[in-house]
Image: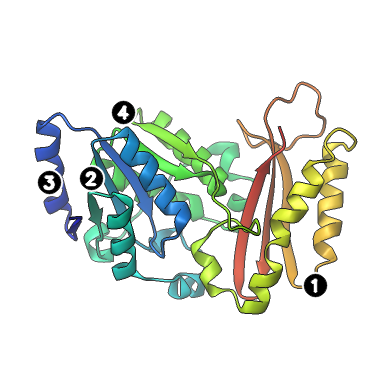
Amino acid sequence: MIQVFNYITDIQKFLKSEREKGHSVGLVPTMGALHEGHLSLVRRAEKENDIVVASVFVNPVQFNNSTDFEKYPRTPERDIEMLQNAGCDAVFVPSEKEMYPVPVTDKYDFGDLERVMEGVCRPGHFNGVAIVVRKLFEIVMPDRAYFGEKDFQQQAIIRKLVADLSLNLTIVPCDIVREKDGLAMSSRNMRLTPEERAVAPMIYKVLSEVAALKDSLSPDEMKKLALEKYADIKDFDVEYVEITDETNLKSIKSWDNCKNARIFVALQLGQVRLIDNLRIF
């Protein structure tokens, strides 16, 4: 039976007793409204650790849009049931007051990693992510923490956070989980209307079509083609398409000497903002 903790002292007491037994701990941080993508992280963590902890907390300090925060789906009872069925041992469901008893003023600088893509479109977002992730790491003290690659830039930021603070844990990247029609699983998908949900798979379809032309197109030509294809879909309002090196997220102008390229997109579909990415090679 999964154990549910609302208070930091309680989950720390539980984890202290597990560590005294020599048990390793895997952490899956989430904002709830869980889907198969989250559960795949839990199952991976369950295979690689003795104890799996998930957190369910909609983090206010990473939202630069108050409406987006208010509308973010919240399904805690369903989340807990899904986590139990996936093999999670404990879930941490704190209140905002429990996580932030005093106003948060921490400031982080992740350099060029936060000055592209999501960092430009969502000012302050990654600072808020760093605040909550560091706090969760300090509370849970996991051996490993699991993050999906749909939020690839976030994963890069968290890796730098761990390196900068010399934290003793391993960040485990996990593949994007997709619906049968290719749409990347996201809690935000719940907010799509049936009509929007029908067109949403075109996000991935365009990425796939464009990435398949890597041998005949330059990065700039590939980016231009993707923007043209998205522009043909009237429901999409594209914020960016970028092709970057996976390791440093710097824009790629030539395939020469490039070993790890990835294409990224962010767009608005109705009232919902969606992101996706695909490895080119």
Mark 2 near mark 4, Cβ–Cβ under 8 Å? no
Q: Is residue 155 left or right of residue 61?
A: right
Question: Percent position (x, y) of residue 103?
Answer: 30, 60
- Nearer-N-terminus badge (4/1): 4
Q: Nearer the viewer, mark 4 or mark 1?
A: 1
Task: Give the alpha-carbon distance from disc 4 to disc 1, as whole Å.
Answer: 47 Å
Residue corresponding to mark 3: 14
Question: How many other residues sit within 10 Å of disc 3, few (<14), some (14-19) or many (≥20)?
Answer: some
- Asked if the residue at tag 3 contacts the one at tag 1, i.e. Cβ–Cβ closer than 8 Å, the answer is no
Residue found 27% across the figure and 47% down from its top: 53
The answer to whether residue 151 is visible is: yes
Q: Nearer the viewer, mark 3 or mark 2?
A: 3
Which label number is shown at residue 234?
1
Q: Are marks 4 and 1 in contact (CB under 8 Å)?
A: no
Residue at figure coordinates x 64%, y 37% from the top left: 249
User: Dot 4: few (<14), some (14–19), or many (≥20) neighbours within 10 Å?
Assistant: few
Q: CA distance from mark 2 to mark 1?
A: 46 Å
- N-terminal label among 2 and 1: 2
Question: Dot 2 lies on which element?
Answer: helix
- Residues packed near mark 1 inside 10 Å, few (<14), some (14 to 19) or many (20 plus): few
Q: Amino acid at mark 4?
A: Asn
- Residue 168: which numbered mark, if any? 4
Mark 3 to mark 4 CA distance (whole Å)? 20 Å
